[in-house]
Image (tube, grey):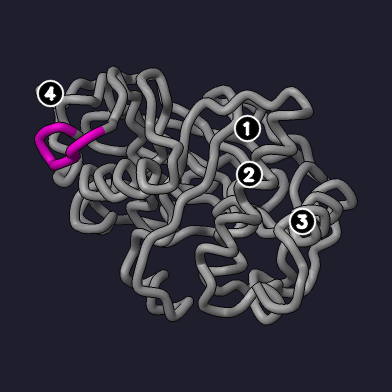
Amino acid sequence: MSGHAGPGRFAGRLEGAAAARVAIPPLREEIGAGDVDAAYAVQAELTRRRVARGGHVVGRKVGLTSPAVQAQLGVDQPDLGVLFADMQVRDGAVVPAGTLLQPRIEAEVAFRLGQDLTGELDPAKVRDAVEHAVAALEIVDSRIEDWDIGIVDTVADNGSSALFVLGGVRRTLDELEPRDVRMSLSVDGRVVSTGSGEDCLGDPLAALLWLARTAQRQGDPLRAGEVVLSGALGPMVAVVPGTTVRADITSLGPVAVEFGKE
């Protein structure tokens, strides 16, 4: 991290942006454009502050799982963020206007873990740890102006996370092969994004394995009961107030959310 600015300074700026709903310039030049570890230190400080204010961690999210998005941002790796209880929106509920800065939405496969992911991790262990899968919508948001983000900006900003919605249909991995699912995302009934399980790092379970290894390396392993958003199955779409967004994922059914008018 350039100069002597610690994670707290950048965490404070991001908190201020979220509270005032006014985006800030990119942080990457000050943090160091390639210093992903420093960016995770900022994210950890944000998490620490949120927990100190009573926030309850319920899971994690994987971002930058799509090759197209990685190419857009000039990165060659996924990233992760932390999910808090107050980020969950009920299926079909309305997100009030003015809640977020510059939201976008994407459809994903979410996993609920039935056991901790610690020790030697491989695809078989990760699969066994999944209690069930559900369809999910992730509403991402950036506290950085105009979504002008590199890997360091999005990591520091908790993976550009905001809210998430979980569908009502639960499937075990005996009933569902995540890499085979097909996804269709529609706004007011018009399809605006499509994709498949293979568009998420080749397999959403591969994204979960990456996350489990990374979280363990960071000293904060995935635990039983946590929810994991495994990454977008297709392009993300800008949110327009007054619309209803619905995703349909084969075998997992629909999941929807409304956005209030201004």
3 and 1 marks in contact (CB < 8 Å)? no
Residue 253 image point, x, y percent: 32, 29
Residue at the spot of label 4: 175
CA gap, disc 2 to disc 4?
30 Å
Closer to the chain start, of discs 1 and 2, is 1
Crowding near pointer 2: few (<14 within 10 Å), some, many (20+)? many
Q: Which mark is residue 9?
A: none
Q: Secondary structure at mark 4?
A: loop
Residue at the spot of label 1: 87
Q: Amino acid at mark 1?
A: Met
Which residue sits at x=71%, y=44%?
242
Magenta region:
119-125
Mark 4 or mark 1, whichever is nearer to me: 1
Mark 4 or mark 3, whichever is nearer to me: 3
Q: Amino acid at mark 3?
A: Leu
Closer to the chain start, of discs 2 and 3, is 3
1 and 2 marks in contact (CB < 8 Å)? yes
Q: Secondary structure at mark 3?
A: helix
Closer to the chain start, of discs 4 and 1, is 1
